[in-house]
Image (spheres, helix red, strand yellow):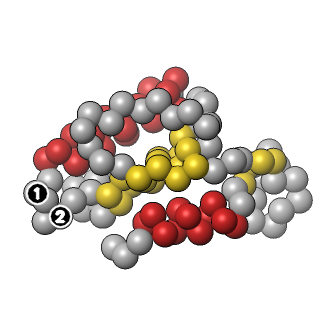
Amino acid sequence: MSEAKAMIFVYTDEFAHSQWCMQEWSQFISESKRRPLQRPLKGIVLDLSGNSSLVLNGVPVQRVSAAKFQAKHDPLAWDKGDFIITESALQSLIDAIGDL
């Protein structure tokens, strides 16, 4: 994480109840505060829940709202039951990442 330029968090309704997700979120907050302004860690939250309640603690993140839907027979999904996002949401995520 100390060399990462960006972190993307895929926020679902289950995110806040996962100890692993919350641990990674806390590590992101700590790393963001530790870094000098010349080398910031970009944070992006892909919000699939519609009501992200992440505590930001003064760390700037960019939120990208997207709806998830069942993949069914989409060749981009890895497995049955996977969710995908629309092309426009994907483009918004790519725009949020920007140049690294």
Q: Which element is circle 1 on?
A: loop
Picture residue at 45% right of the left edge, 64% below the top: 96
Q: Is residue 26 left or right of residue 47?
A: left
Disc 1 residue crowd, few under 14, some 14–19, many 20+, Cα 10 Å: few
Picture residue at 49% right of the left edge, 69% below the top: 95
Residue under pointer 1: 36
Image coordinates of residue 53 in percent, x first then y, are: 47, 30
**Vertical order, 95 against 23 (above or below):** below
Q: Is residue 59 left or right of residue 88?
A: left
The disc placed on residue 15 is none
- Tell me the amino acid under the disc marked 2: Arg
Give the total number of marks visible in the rendering. Answer: 2
Image coordinates of residue 34 in percent, x first then y, are: 13, 47
Marks 2 & 1, CB-CB < 8 Å contact: yes
Is residue 3 in view from this perspective?
A: yes
Image coordinates of residue 51 in percent, x first then y, are: 56, 33
Q: CA distance from mark 2 to mark 1?
A: 6 Å
**Vertical order, 55 against 100 (above or below):** above
- Tell me the amino acid under the disc marked 1: Pro
Which residue reaches farthest bottom?
99
Image coordinates of residue 47 in percent, x first then y, are: 55, 44
Disc 2 residue crowd, few under 14, some 14–19, many 20+, Cα 10 Å: few
Picture residue at 26% right of the left edge, 34% below the top: 57
Which residue reaches farthest right?
73
The disc placed on residue 39 is 2
> Which sits in the foreground, 19 or 32?
32
**Location of residue 48 (image quadrant):** top right
If the image is split into quadrants, where does the C terminus sit?
A: bottom left
